Amino acid sequence: MPHLMIFGKDIGIDLGTANTLVCRKGEVILNEPSVVAIRKDTKEILAVGSEAKAMIGRTPGDIIAVQPLQDGVIADYEVTEKMLNYFIRKCVKPSLFNPRLVVGIPRGATSVERRAVEEAAFKAGAREVYLIEEPMAAAIGAGIPIEEPTGHMVVDIGGGTTEIAVTSLGGIVAGRSIRIAGNAMDKAIIMYLRRTYSIVIGERSAEEIKIKIGSAFPEKEEEIEVRGRNLVTGLPVNLMVHTREINEAITEPLSEIVRAVRSTLEETKPEVASDIYENGVILTGGGALIKNIDKLLKHETNLPVFIAEEPLFSVAKGTALVLEHPEILKNLKSRKLKSR
Ligand code: ADP
Ligand code: MG
């Protein structure tokens, strides 16, 4: 059955600010940081993904590690195109039956950015490309029955942005995107340690602290040893930091997320809002893994809050899932290779 063979190669892609994931039939087959290492003068690409991320903060002067997607938008679409091309080629072996691709893109992506994503997909051998807005993919991947005539809310907390969307009858009926998410928490931790202890740490250490002992609602006190540099003497120092301090550090970005959820709810029609009070909010994205973020949101909004199973994979799973749902696929913007 040739049709099934073609279908079997189709993939879904979550082009995230922090990580790019490729999913086929519910299984994540690629998961790498959205980072590209480039030689400054010649613009030559030296490494992509995990290999490039390992170079952050360690590159000699003439090599830079860039994140082509920032704050939920494609900041550098030439590099994004090359990165996407590299990831797709890693997953799709050249053959007679070119695959169909579904790519999750930020809700605010411009037509130029959409076009860049499509071009990258065609250059990498796709025969048809479908674009889906990330919050919609997140909702589908998290198991929300989006087609039903009842309102659901999904909050996707990524690296650069938090996307809030209310779905009903297969569409997004309310939502917003704020440029406050995981990276903002890392930056807040850096600022806190600088202000409190005059110690400077890098972004990767800040992220590690957040993941290991961070909590949105401290219950258990944990501690971690941090190595930084004294701002005044310039010398390396070690320091113990505690959960309550990290919680204090990330209070501001967390409150912004809570505020955005509240105001989205206020904008939602009363019928749909009451559906959400019934159905609850589902959290996706890496930021959903911050300890107790569900408790914080529940406490601040009175809504039932759930964390998606494998929240880092929700968008990717959603993009691959729509390939199996023609009724959703037909509503997405698509472009075929020959129609260009
Ligand atoms: P994007 O969609 O922007 O690529 P992701 O959904 O992949 O983002 O989430 C990346 C963010 O999630 C990063 O800021 C990362 O630090 C954060 N993150 C990942 N794992 C955890 C964890 N266990 N605890 C807290 N934050 C986490
Ligand atoms: Mg994402």
Image (cartoon, rainbow, N blue to C red):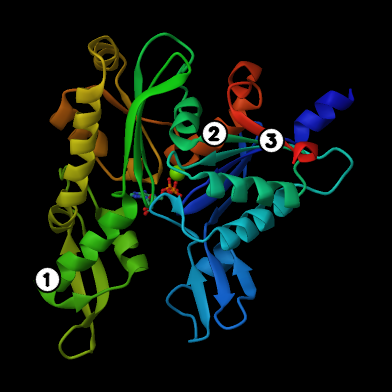
In the image, the residue with mark 1 has its CB under 8 Å from the nearest atom of ligand 1:
no
Q: Is residue 90 above or below residue 317?
A: below
* Res 177 visible: yes
SS under mark 1 = helix
Of the two numbered discs 2 and 3 in the rendering, the one whose residue sits closer to the viewer: 3
Image quadrant, ligand 2: top left
* Res 221 visible: no
Asked whether 118 or 89 is in front, the reply is 118
SS under mark 3 = strand
Within 10 angstroms of label 2, few (less than 14), some, or many (20 or more) residues?
many
Residue 130 image point, x, y percent:
63, 34
Q: Mark 3 points at which residue?
A: 335
Q: Mark 1 points at which residue?
A: 195
Q: Mark 2 points at which residue?
A: 132
Q: Quadrant of the N terminus?
A: top right
Within 10 angstroms of label 1, few (less than 14), some, or many (20 or more) residues?
few
Q: Which amino acid does label 2 sit on?
A: Ile
Question: In the image, 296: left or right of 290?
Answer: left
Q: What residue type is labelled 1?
A: Arg
Residue 315 image point, x, y percent:
50, 37
